[in-house]
Image (spheres, grey):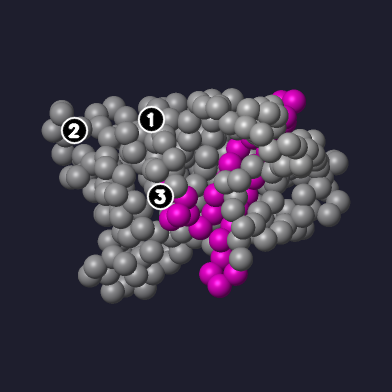
Amino acid sequence: VTLSEGARAGTGRELGMLDSLLSLGGLVLLRDSVEWEGRSLLKALIKKSALCGEQVHILGCEVSEEEFREGFDSDINNRLVYHDFFRDPLNWSKTEEALPGGPLGALRAICKRTDPGPVTIALDSLSWLLLHLPCTTLCQALHAVSHQDSCPGDSSPVGKVSVLGLLHEELHGPGPVGALSSLAQTEVTLGGTKGQASAHILCRRPRQRPTDQTQWFSILPDFSLDLQEGPSVESQPCSDPHIPPVSKNARARTRKCSLGSGQRGEHKSCRGWGWGQGF
């Protein structure tokens, strides 16, 4: 992680929050959109894991292996174990190197590994898996692989497991997104303004209230993270991360509406943010 000039002061807390994406283990949900793509951040986190000496497994379903590896240097590429489900996802060619059971078979194989060291599993993407597998089946597999003590017959020492799942949120309804959200230890929702990308990070730690923070960043050509100066947002307890913040103007409109005559049909413009809108 590198720091731009404007972000060098006072970034210890921010770096800790960013590092928590991998340090906590479990499922890290990367929620992107058409406007703000998340594969670059996924690759930046993969690079960070590889440089830390972790085992890194990639389940590639959405782009070719060549495209995914593009931009990594040879040292990083040599550390990645790539499971290619893009070229022949249903194994119609009946190749011997294909893992039985497809992507979920690969997840189960990683779950049964004997090496006790830390491992990072990148799913590119969760959206592809959701479109080809039942949501309950996928959630059960994710829970098992991100909680190694849930794997039957695995008595070997267990290292930390981080699962990085790229989710194209606009492709799915609230049900599947909510189910995956409930499994995640960390959620990263990508956004931004005026061409500058931001990541809203929500962390759930055991026996603690969730905390959230917004980090401004850019991705360098070699997939290093460059922290940017942005609006100061303090880490704070978060009761419901899916309720959008309400601006002062919106609160004023809502108050004006509630103080109105109470007759139906009046103040239709006071309905508030999001009414009648959809994707």
> In the image, is 278 to the left or to the right of 215?
left
Which secondary structure, mark 3? Answer: helix
Among numbered discs 2 and 3, the one appearing first in the sequence: 2
The reply to whether discs 1 and 3 touch (Cβ–Cβ < 8 Å) is: no
Which secondary structure, mark 2? Answer: loop
Front residue of 95 and 238 = 238
Name the residue tied to disc 1.
62
Q: Is residue 110 magenta?
A: no
Camera-side mark, 2 or 3: 3
Amino acid tagged 3: Ala
Q: Kindly report the distance in space between the C-alpha atoms of the residues bearing marks 2 and 3.
A: 29 Å
The reply to whether residue 191 is in sight is yes
**In which quarter of the view is residue 203 placed?**
bottom right
Residue 215 point in image, percent of width and height:
70, 45
Name the residue tied to disc 2.
91
Q: Is residue 187 magenta?
A: yes
Name the residue tied to disc 3.
179
Could you tell me which residue is drawn at 25 percent across and 32 percent down? 89
Front residue of 33 and 239 = 239
The image shows residue 163, relative to residue 198, as above or below, that is below
Amino acid tagged 1: Glu
Among numbered discs 1 and 2, the one appearing first in the sequence: 1
Amino acid tagged 2: Asn
Among numbered discs 1 and 3, the one appearing first in the sequence: 1
**In which quarter of the view is residue 38 placed?**
top right
